[in-house]
Image: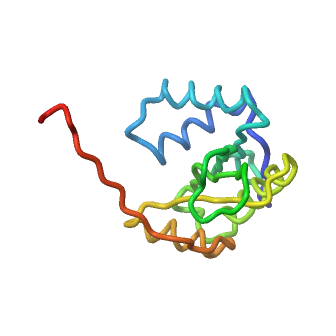
Amino acid sequence: MMRIAPCDPQSVDAWTALRLELWPETSLSEHIAEAEAILGKPKEAMAFLAHDVRGTALAFAEASLRHDYVNGCVTSPVAFLEGIYVRPAHRRQGIARLLVEAVEDWAQGIGCAELASDVELHNAISQGMHLAVGFEETERVVYYRKDLRDR
């Protein structure tokens, strides 16, 4: 039986360990600072952990409230799924769906009518998960930049 719970100060270690698995290019100290910032603004951001029967954290989801334009959305503000991660050995068991449902409940509780997310074009696994939990693809975008310092 999986248990989904909001992150709190006592879960920061487990949460940041999972964040580090998803985003290894970010340092642990940065993950801790970001997690603490999320905890400090519960009406603007939220995070959830999925725990197995032994209490081990296996997955997390983070969401924030976005007031700017969100691609494909027609309302504002929009809840935005900023990150979701399930350890590979525990995927395809409905954990991501439970986490997304927790985010949906949070979003509706703060008055949002839409939940949005994004996925990198090469991340077919995440794209499949988003479709499986009820998201619909709205558009594909490739961003560009040009460094003007080297002109």
Against 147, residue 105 (above or below) is below
Front residue of this view, candidates 129 and 92: 129
Residue farthest along the left direction in this orientation: 151
Front residue of this view, candidates 28 and 135: 135
- What color scheme is it? rainbow
Residue farthest along the right direction in this orientation: 109
> On the rendered structure, is 137 left or right of 25?
right
Q: How many marks?
A: 0
Position of residue 112 measured from the top left corner of the image (x, y, whole percent) = 80, 53
Front residue of this view, candidates 53 and 13: 13
Position of residue 49 measured from the top left corner of the image (x, y, whole percent) = 70, 46
Q: Report the quarter where the C terminus lies.
A: top left
Seen at 50% across and 70% down, the residue is 139
Q: Report the quarter where the N terminus lies.
A: bottom right
Q: Quadrant of residue 12?
A: top right
Position of residue 37 measured from the top left corner of the image (x, y, whole percent) = 64, 27
Against 118, residue 35 (above or below) is above
Q: Quadrant of residue 42?
A: top right
Front residue of this view, candidates 19 and 143: 143
Seen at 79% across and 36% down, the residue is 43
Seen at 78% across and 42% down, the residue is 6
Position of residue 81 measured from the top left corner of the image (x, y, whole percent) = 63, 53
> On the rendered structure, is 133 left or right of 17?
right
> On the rendered structure, is 21 left or right of 99?
left
Seen at 65% across and 62% down, the residue is 73
